[in-house]
Image: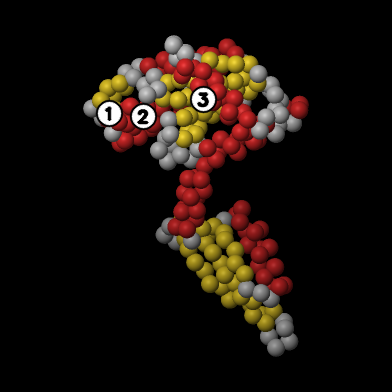
Amino acid sequence: IYEEDAVVFSEWFEATMASGQSSQVEVRCLHAQKGWVWTQFHGTPVYDDNQQFLHIVFVVRDISVEKELEEQLSLYAYVDRLSALPNRTALTQDLDVLLARKEDEREPYAVLMLNIDDFKRVNEKFGYTFGDDVIRYVGDVLQSFVTADVKAYRLAGDEFVIKVAKANAPTVRDLLQRITEKLEQPVTLGDITLTIPASMGGIISQHYDYTVTQLLLEVDEMVHKVKLSSTHEYQIEMI
């Protein structure tokens, strides 16, 4: 049994012996051919006529495949499969954590949104498969800017969100400028070469009394202003 799981197994054994009830535990065990594998022990305690414990009958099963599937399902719950970025669920959870910071841990933060310009027209002109390629490419671009303080998410469709945990105006503007420059560089996807203009905007705030919904509405409003402007340059608002 794996060293870190030995205590778990020992406690389970003692509890099963004391309870007199069948139960099960999952631990890692060393397999002769496969190495360390997740293993399920189903144990039933056996007693003599005087109710003295004799032994436990085990049914042992390799559950490594099930464990891998569990990990994949857990991953899919928080990761957008198309862009490979964290999804809306992950964003909501992370913003909840950010907004719940203790007062002495609070610092200015930024929440930014990116919409791909004319994405509907891209789908109509080149097809939805190509549109998926564009989403993947934008996901890769945003992932390349991720740091300890910067995290990118795909919200839905052609909407992406960037969270900056420790933010100031110069740093955020520099980040958006570098993303803009990267997306404006021609890229070849399949046999089509194009640039990917995007509207970006967001807020920098020191306020922690927002709900996640209120925060995202503020950010969405900023992006809407960018879309309506003639230049489509990114806009940041301090709130």
Report the Cα–Cα distance between label 2 and label 1.
9 Å
The residue that label 2 is drawn on is 120
Is residue 175 visible in the rendered image? The answer is no
Q: In the drawing, what numbered circle is on residue 125? A: 1
Instruction: Identify the secondary structure beneath mark 1.
Output: helix
Residue type of the residue flagged with mark 3:
Met
| Cβ atoms under marks 2 and 1 closer than 8 Å | no
Task: Report the amino acid beneath label 2.
Answer: Lys
Image: 53 above or below 67: below
Front residue of this view, candidates 133 and 148: 133
**Which of the two discs, 1 and 3, labels the residue nearer the N terminus?**
3
Label 2 element class: helix
Q: Residue furthest left?
A: 191
Q: Are marks 1 and 3 in contact (CB under 8 Å)?
A: no
Q: Measuring from the top left, give residue 93's x and y in whole percent.
A: 60, 38
Residue farthest to the right, as pictured: 104
> Residue 49 — which label?
none
Query: Is there CB contact under 8 Å for labels 2 and 3?
Result: no
Does 173 appear above or below 106? above
Q: Earlier in the sequence, mark 2 or mark 3?
A: 3
Of badges 1 and 3, the one in the foreground is: 1
Q: Which residue is mark 3?
A: 113
Lateral position of residue 38 relative to residue 13, left or right: left
